[in-house]
């Protein structure tokens, strides 16, 4: 019977002005399809993509329109070492702007996280390989929002970000 060899917590590292999307996919064409989904979403969007193959050559495949962000994505994928996972590093855009496009890619099985928070990835390793078991996105709650916090949240969405009118 196969057994778990070890559990590991991997801290992803990315620039503070970026957001990331971590997911699971199943096919070598993932890099091309994610590139198309992202590059057509906004002319201002800068991004890097890395995808860990889990069969054949088992390479980290990559693409993007920003060399720095491509390197960040590849370095993080090498740290994770989890097959059939992908990482998108975004600048000048937010996951909310591209997440539906990413989820619509035929190869994408799931999205584990879409965040600008510090992200820790729970990795499980067996004799066969490594996989993403889950994520720790940001920090634990420190309480329940007050009326003042509600006003601040609404102000952020309406006046600062411009998502609500």
Image (cartoon, rainbow, N blue to C red):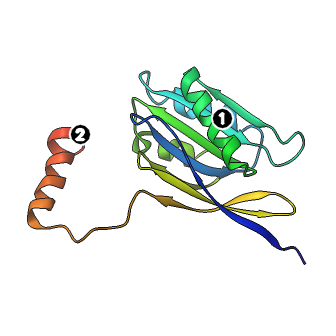
**Do the residues bearing badges 2 and 1 touch, measured as CB atoms within 8 Å?**
no
53 sits to left or right of 95: right
Where is residue 56? Give x, y as percent: 90, 43
Picture residue at 11% right of the left edge, 57% below the top: 151
* Label 1 crowd bin: few (<14), some (14–19), many (20+), radius 10 Å: many
Compared with 73, 9 (above or below) is below
> 49 or 25, which is in the foreground?
49
Quadrant of the rendered structure where residue 18 is? top left
Picture residue at 44% right of the left edge, 21% below the top: 43
Quadrant into which the C terminus falls: top left
Quadrant into which the N terminus falls: bottom right
Q: Is residue 101 visible?
A: yes
Where is residue 102? Give x, y as percent: 55, 44
- Disc 2: which residue: 161
Quadrant of the rendered structure where residue 143 is? bottom left
- Disc 1: which residue: 74
> 6 or 99, which is in the foreground?
6
Where is residue 63? Give x, y as percent: 65, 27
Number of numbered discs: 2
> 12 or 60, which is in the foreground?
12
Q: Nearer the viewer, mark 2 or mark 1?
A: 1
> 104 or 134, which is in the foreground?
134
6 sits to left or right of 95: right
């Amino acid at each position: 019977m196969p057994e778990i060899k070890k559990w590991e917590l991997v801290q992803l590292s990315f620039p503070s002005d970026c957001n990331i999307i971590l997911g699971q996919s199943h096919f070598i064409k993932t890099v091309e399809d994610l590139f198309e989904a992202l590059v057509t979403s906004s002319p201002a969007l800068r991004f890097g993509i890395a995808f860990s193959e889990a069969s054949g050559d088992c390479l980290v495949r990559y693409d993007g329109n920003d060399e720095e962000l491509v390197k960040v994505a590849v370095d993080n994928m090498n740290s994770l070492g989890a097959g059939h996972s992908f990482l998108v590093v975004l600048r000048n855009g937010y996951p909310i702007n591209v997440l539906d496009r990413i989820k619509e890619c035929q190869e994408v099985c799931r999205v584990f996280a879409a965040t600008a928070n510090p992200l820790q990835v729970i990795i499980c390793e067996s004799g066969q390989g490594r996989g993403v078991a889950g994520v720790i996105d940001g920090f634990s709650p420190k309480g329940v929002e007050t009326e003042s916090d509600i006003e601040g949240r609404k102000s952020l969405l309406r006046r600062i970000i411009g998502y609500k009118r």
